[in-house]
Amino acid sequence: MSIIDFDHINIRTANVTAMTSFYAEVLGLEEGWRPDFSFPGAWLYLADRPLIHLRGVDITPGASEVRIEHFAFRATGLNAFLTALRERRVAYNVNVSPSNNNRMVNVYDPDNNHVEIQFDASETSDLSAYTPT
C-alpha cells in the first residue's frame, strides 16, 4: 500500500451553517457538491478538492468528545493493505462511497483516532470487515 495524498478531514458539528460560513468567509473555501448521505452536512472545497467535510450532529460535542470524526488519505494497493492489516491483527471495516464507489477502509490508531484510507473503485479485494479474535 502506498499513501499518495491527503484527502480530507471530517468534523462533527451541530452548527453546520455557522461552520460552513466560517470556512467560506474566513478561509475562502467554497461550499460545493456533497453525496446524498443519510445525515446532514456540507463539503468545503479548495479549488476542485473537498478538503473539509462537515458532519451534522444533533448536539454540539462536549469538550471531552470527538469533534474531528476522522481524517483521510488516498492510497493505492487495497488488497495488499488489507492483507497487511490482518497480518498485524488490526481491526478494520470497509465502506463503499455512494458517489463514486471508492473503497473507504476505516481503522483506529492506538489513541483511538479514526483514520480513513480511500482506494479507487477499480481496486478489488474482499471488503469484509475484520476483527481479530
Image: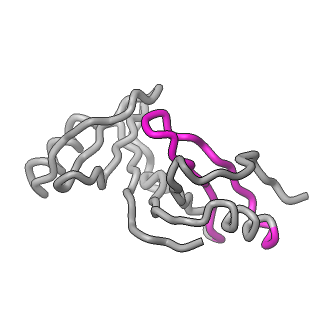
Q: Which residues are magenta?
A: 87-110
| Residue 118 spot, x, y in % from top left | 51, 56
Q: Residue at x 38, y 50 (%)?
A: 11
Is residue 115 found left or right of 89 in the rendered image?
A: left
Residue at the far front: name it.
122
Quadrant in the picture for residue 12: top left
Q: Residue at x 40, y 51 (%)?
A: 10
Of the pair 114 and 126, the residue shown nearer to us: 126
Q: Residue at x 22, y 50 (%)?
A: 45
Q: Is residue 9 above or below residue 19?
A: below
| Residue 87 spot, x, y in % from top left | 81, 71
Q: Residue at x 50, y 65 (%)?
A: 75
Is residue 75 found left or right of 88 in the rendered image?
A: left
| Residue 89 spot, x, y in % from top left | 81, 67
Q: Is residue 23 magenta?
A: no
Please state, as top left, top right, bottom left or bottom right, where the N terminus lies in the image: bottom right
Q: Is residue 58 above or below residue 7?
A: above
Coloring scheme of the render? one colour
Quadrant in the picture for residue 80: bottom right
Q: Is residue 94 magenta?
A: yes
Please state, as top left, top right, bottom left or bottom right, where the C terminus lies in the image: bottom right
Of the pair 122 and 82, the residue shown nearer to us: 122
